[in-house]
Image (cartoon, grey):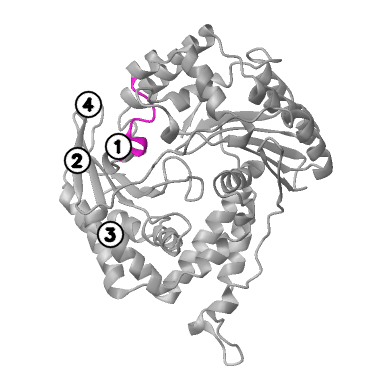
Amino acid sequence: MLSSRRLIPSLLLGLGGILALNACSQKTTSGVTSDQKAPQPAQAAKVATYQVPVDYFTLDNGLKVVLSPDKTAPKVVVAVYYGVGFRNEPRNRTGYAHLFEHLMFQGSQNLPKGEFDKIVQSSGGINNGSTRFDFTNYFEIVPSHKLETLLWVEGDRMRSVALTPASLENQQGVVKNEVKVNVLNQPYGGFPWLDMPQYANKNWHNAHNFYGDLKDLDAATLEDAESFFKTFYAPNNAALVVVGDFTPAEAKTWIKKYFDSIPKATLPAKVDLTEPRQEKEQRFTKDDKLATKPALAFAYHMPDKNTPEYYAMGLLDQILIQGKDSRLYQALVQERGYTGSVSGGINSGLGNMFNYNGPMLWDGSLVYDKNVSTDSVVAVLDREIQKLDKEGVSQELLDLAIVKMRSRLYDQVSQLYGFGKADLLASFALFENDPKRINQLESEFRKVTPELIQKTLREYLRPTNRTILTINPLAKS
């Protein structure tokens, strides 16, 4: 992700492991004793699941609010998600959404620059922000008694961020330096999370340099910043989520107090993000003067979000690339030793399969030995996909993929004192007006059948729907 700060991830709270263990205890037909009945698909969908509390309402100014109390620890997460990301930024202003994320940390109407951080850090909390494809988010994790203070702070900068020529110039320099450090002066910089969308997509909104060209960053003006704020940073283009140890009635009172009077804006028409159907494989090579080994990334266009095929791709992702038991890890690392690791997934470089709102790629990448040819790596990829197509996906393999997905999902829910939960709730509120979807995800994956898996594989994992990007290393090892 493009982020103004870096966080050290906390240990997961363990909920995912417990739920996964429960899922593993459900036997398939082959393990049923004479006095047991094999669970039917309809019955499997009724398996008791962990339910996230969701209290959802909208203020008169259009601000979507989600409250999810959790007494596990005396902490609260406050997260504000704005419906603007890379795909909304203006032409000739590449990287602008990320630049503006930085500007939101430069002070507000009642808080000079640096005071926001002091409030959070003096209480033992942490705060951060990031820019993604379809949103920019800001969040704080603080002791519970600081909730009202943080709601006031977020309301203050939503109402009136401090934009000055000095702050703009300062943050242009910070972002340009970030580009140089993280991309231009780094081996494999931007590979593949920044590179692949530019090669695989055709629509400019999906395919431009999200980090920003240096000339575009230099060209941004204070008038651009003020217009961007008035256009996108309005309550009717945002979702506010509170997760953790708090009293909902009290939180509602504070939220109305600090956000209700912020005026709504007239939002622009939604950007057309449509991608044409890909009918021919694309292959590209990129020289890297700092890389010492070749690297390869592959990407396939995803099914539309929330379709049956979308959930099937989520399970194919688990089968093919997630974990050391995945087909590609076993084939490329364990069996052939081409590489030490394979990574990837759905929206893998900038989030997860739930927190986006438009066309998306399923991708994977690896750095491999110089004595291995690109065609050899691609041949392994083709072989594993063709093997799944030919042999089909057994119910046993599908059940295992569901267990892995279930564990991964609940790891997400419990991550970082509930921030992972806040991320899902905010995304579902912002994009679908339905944060309660968080409690329906498992049942959606359980609807997937082996037949749907195979149908999805044949349509979306075909070579003609694929882009291959290789890194040509120019540095001496």
What amino acid is at disc 1?
Gln
Q: Residue furthest top?
A: 166
Q: Residue 352 or 359: which is nearer the viewer?
A: 359
Q: Earlier in the sequence, mark 2 or mark 4?
A: 2
Q: Which residue is mark 2?
A: 284
Residue 339: give x, y in percent of width and height. Answer: 28, 48
Using the image, determine if residue 382 lies above or below residue 33.
Answer: above
Q: Which residue is mark 4?
A: 289
What segment is highlighted magenta in the picture?
A: 203-213
Q: Residue 181 or 339: which is nearer the viewer?
A: 181
Distance, label 1 to label 4, CA atoms, is 20 Å
Q: Earlier in the sequence, mark 3 or mark 1?
A: 1
Distance, label 3 to label 2, CA atoms, is 27 Å
Q: Secondary structure at mark 4?
A: loop
Q: Earlier in the sequence, mark 1 or mark 2?
A: 1
The residue shown at (26%, 27%) is: 290
Tell me if residue 424 is in the magenta stretch.
no
